[in-house]
Image: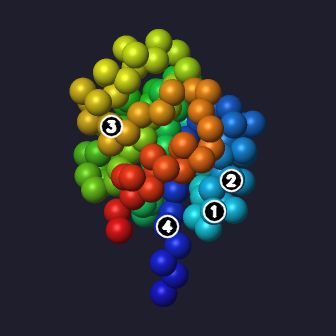
Amino acid sequence: MDNTKRILIVDDSDELTQVIAEFLGMCGYSVFTARDGIDALRFMEKETMDVVVSDIHMPRMDGYTLMTEIKSRHPRTPIILITGFSVSEAQKMAFEKGADAFVAKPFHLKDLKGVIESVMPH
């Protein structure tokens, strides 16, 4: 059986999503992407993820709403929220709403990988 850890990246920035996906793929993860929360939830109806990394500010469904939906449907899936807007307030809200971790943009890919590994189920 394949033990590769599966990560879903949810962000409306195609460029950032591609860079993160390529980096994590080179690190040995299976990486999937979605452009917003609605697409992410549809994807997760069919696929199980080990970790979800989501931007907070996206069209159609923001990261907080996505996180609430994932936590209600997949309570064991760790969620990392990322944003570059109002970082201290966003971080406070992220943890109040149940995020497993928070990463401020801009970030170094190796730092994001470290955060992912810290919340990843073993």
Which numbered disc, 2 or 4, marks the residue that appears first in the sequence? 4
Which numbered disc, 1 or 4, marks the residue that appears first in the sequence? 4
Give the quarter of the image for residue 28. bottom right
Q: Is residue 85 left or right of residue 76?
A: right
Q: Which residue is pictured at 68% across the width and 53% down the height?
A: 23
Q: Which amino acid type is shown beneath numbered disc 1?
A: Cys
Give the quarter of the image for residue 92. top left
Secondary structure beneath dot 1 equals loop
Contact (CB < 8 A) between labels 2 and 1? yes
Q: How crowded is mark 3: few (under 14 residues within 10 Å), some or many (20 or more)?
A: some
Q: State how far apart marks 1 and 3 are (Cα).
A: 24 Å
Look at mark 3 in the image and give the residue it sits on.
99
Closest to the camera, between mark 2 and mark 3, is 2
Look at mark 2 in the image and give the residue it sits on.
23
Q: Percent position (x, y) of residue 107?
A: 59, 33
Q: State how far apart marks 2 and 1 are (Cα).
A: 6 Å
Q: How crowded is mark 4: few (under 14 residues within 10 Å), some or many (20 or more)?
A: some
Which numbered disc, 2 or 3, marks the residue that appears first in the sequence? 2
Q: Is residue 18 left or right of residue 100?
A: right
Q: State how far apart marks 3 and 4 are (Cα).
A: 19 Å
Q: State how far apart marks 2 and 3 are (Cα).
A: 23 Å
Q: How crowded is mark 2: few (under 14 residues within 10 Å), some or many (20 or more)?
A: some
Foreground pick, 60 / 58: 58
| Residue 109 appears anywhere in the view | yes
Look at mark 1 in the image and give the residue it sits on.
27
Q: Which residue is pictured at 60% across the width and 47% down the height?
A: 110
